[in-house]
Image: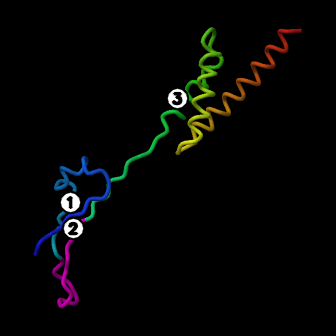
C-alpha cells in the first residue's frame, strides 16, 4: 500500500519531514474493525507561522522614549507614527499600547509647555 504525505503550510520548512512523522502516523493499524473498507494512510503535517507586527513593536518601543532628553521628541513622534501605522495590521496589541503611550506623552508635553509658558 502506498503512503501519501500532504503538506499544509510553508513547503520550504517541510523538506526534512521524515524526522517529524511518528511511526504511529505512518503505519497501518492492524486492529481495524472492518477490513472491507480500504485504508488510505495519509499524513498531514501542519506548519503554522507566528504573525508579528514589526511596525507596531517599533512604535511601542519608540513611544517609551518620550522622556529622553534631546531625542525624546523625535522618538515620541516616530513612535506615534509607527503606532498609527501598526494599528492597521494584525496583531494590534503593542501598536495600541504604543499609541496610548504616545498620547500620554503628548498630553504631558502640552502640560509642560503650558506650565513653562506662564
Q: Quadrant of the C terminus?
A: top right
Q: Residue at x 73, y 24 (%)?
A: 106
Residue 36 magenta-drawn?
A: yes
In 3D space, how far apart are the residues under numbered discs 3 and 1 (Cα atoms)? 38 Å
Provide the residue designation for mark 3: 58
Do the residues under discs 3 and 2 have CB atoms within 8 angstroms? no
Marks 3/1 in contact by CB < 8 Å: the verdict is: no
Residue lying farthest to the left in this orientation: 1
Check disc 2 and report the residue beneath it.
Answer: 25
Lower position in the chain sequence, tag 3 or tag 2? 2
Q: Quadrant of residue 63?
A: top right
Give coordinates of residue 18: x percent, y percent: 16, 56
Question: Could you tell me residue 10's position as x and y percent?
Answer: 30, 50
Quarter holding the N terminus is bottom left
Q: Is residue 42 left or right of residue 94?
A: left
Report the mark closest to the observer, 3 or 2.
3
Please provide the residue range marked out in magenta. 29-43
| Disc 1 to disc 2: CB gap under 8 Å | yes
Which residue is pictured at 57% across the width and 42% down the height? 92
Determine crowd level at label 1: few under 14, some 14-19, many 20+ residues with C-alpha closer than 10 A: some
Task: Pinpoint residue 101: horizontal percent, then vertical percent.
Answer: 66, 30
Q: Nearer the viewer, residue 20 or 37?
A: 37
Dot label at residue 21: 1
In the figure, residue 83 lies in which quadrant?
Answer: top right
Query: Label 3: how many residues lie within 10 Å, few (<14), some (14-19) or many (20+)?
Result: many
Which mark is first along the chain, 1 or 3? 1
Amino acid at each position: 500500500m502506498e503512503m501519501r504525505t500532504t503538506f499544509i503550510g510553508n513547503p520550504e520548512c517541510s523538506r526534512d519531514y521524515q524526522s517529524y512523522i511518528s511511526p504511529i502516523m505512518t503505519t497501518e493499524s492492524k486492529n481495524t474493525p472492518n477490513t472491507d473498507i480500504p485504508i488510505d494512510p495519509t499524513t498531514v503535517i501542519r506548519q503554522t507561522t507566528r504573525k508579528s507586527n514589526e511596525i507596531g513593536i517599533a512604535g511601542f518601543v519608540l513611544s517609551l522614549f518620550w522622556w529622553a532628553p534631546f531625542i525624546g521628541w523625535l522618538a515620541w513622534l516616530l513612535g506615534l507614527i509607527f503606532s498609527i501605522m501598526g494599528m492597521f495590521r494584525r496583531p494590534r496589541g503593542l501598536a495600541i499600547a504604543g499609541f496610548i503611550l504616545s498620547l500620554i506623552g503628548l498630553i504631558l508635553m502640552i502640560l509642560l509647555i503650558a506650565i513653562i509658558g506662564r
